Image (tube, rainbow, N blue to C red):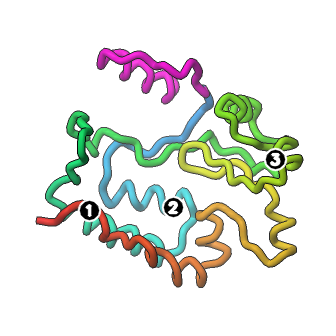
């Protein structure tokens, strides 16, 4: 059973109905459920990240593990989250990165169309730069070459970590540090 179908079945078993009317059923690669150092290593390896990024992820994970509880949100109630029952990485089964939006899996394009997200010709006509992300990966980035000609770097963060590490290292966590989350013990 595909991951999306399992999610829908889980929602139904909890008494909910899937209200949005569609799923994108593509073959996916998933990390095993749970958050631990092996999961973090798995994600970092899938994204071909350098060692410094893996170290940054481990520091963030260490801070998260020391947190006592989640914030209390006003007028919001939800069941306690089981963080060990979540897949922290999912990606459409490995295929070459499309050179243009027209080369994207048609099922993914239909999903973006249903969501009203401009890709391909609509993006070009509207003059909109888009980095389309599906699950854990970027599936298409529009206007990348044109923006590059103007000196603008527009790419997925995974690519930026590999291609522009000096910029990512300089600014990663500079606005919201990895330690700026829930309260600590």
Identity of the residue drawn at 17% across and 54% down? 69
Give the residue number, with chain letter if any, for mark 2: 45
118 above or below 111? below
The Cα atoms of the two marked residues, 3 and 1, are separated by 38 Å
Residue 115 image position (x, y, % from top left): 64, 33
Q: Is 86 left, or right, of 143 in this rendering?
A: left
- The reply to whether the C-beta atoms of the residues labelled 3 and 2 are less than 8 Å apart is no
Quarter of the image where the C terminus is located: bottom left
Residue 169 image position (x, y, % from top left): 52, 81
Marked residue nearer the N-terminal end (3 or 1): 1
Between residues 71 and 63, which one lies in front from this camera angle? 71
Marked residue nearer the N-terminal end (3 or 2): 2
Residue 147 image position (x, y, % from top left): 81, 68
Marked residue nearer the N-terminal end (2 or 1): 2
Residue 141 lies in quadrant: bottom right
- Magenta highlight range: 1-24
Give the residue number, with chain letter if any, for mark 1: 64
Q: Residues within 10 Å of mark 2 (few under 14, many from 20)?
A: few
Q: Residues within 10 Å of mark 3 (few under 14, many from 20)?
A: some
Identity of the residue drawn at 51% across and 61% down? 45
Label ID, residue 123: 3
Identity of the residue drawn at 58% across and 24% down? 23
Label 3 sits on a secondary structure element that is: helix
Residue 4 image position (x, y, % from top left): 50, 27
């Amino acid at each position: 059973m595909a991951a999306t179908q399992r999610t829908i079945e889980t929602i139904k078993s909890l008494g909910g109905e899937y209200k949005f009317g569609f799923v994108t059923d593509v073959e996916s690669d998933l990390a095993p459920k749970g958050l631990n150092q092996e999961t973090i290593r798995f994600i970092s390896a899938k994204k071909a990240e350098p060692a410094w990024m893996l170290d940054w992820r481990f520091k963030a994970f260490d801070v998260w593990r020391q947190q006592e509880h989640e914030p209390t949100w006003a007028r919001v109630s939800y069941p306690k989250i089981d963080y060990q029952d979540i897949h922290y990485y999912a990606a459409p089964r490995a295929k070459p990165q499309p050179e243009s939006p027209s080369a994207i899996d048609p099922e993914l394009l239909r999903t973006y169309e249903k969501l009203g997200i401009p890709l391909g010709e609509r993006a070009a006509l509207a003059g909109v730069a888009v980095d389309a992300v599906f699950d854990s990966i970027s599936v298409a980035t529009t206007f990348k070459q044109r923006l590059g000609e103007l000196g603008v770097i527009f790419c997925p963060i995974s690519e930026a970590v590999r291609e522009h590490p000096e910029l990512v290292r300089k600014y990663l966590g500079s606005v919201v540090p990895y330690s700026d989350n829930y309260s600590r013990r």
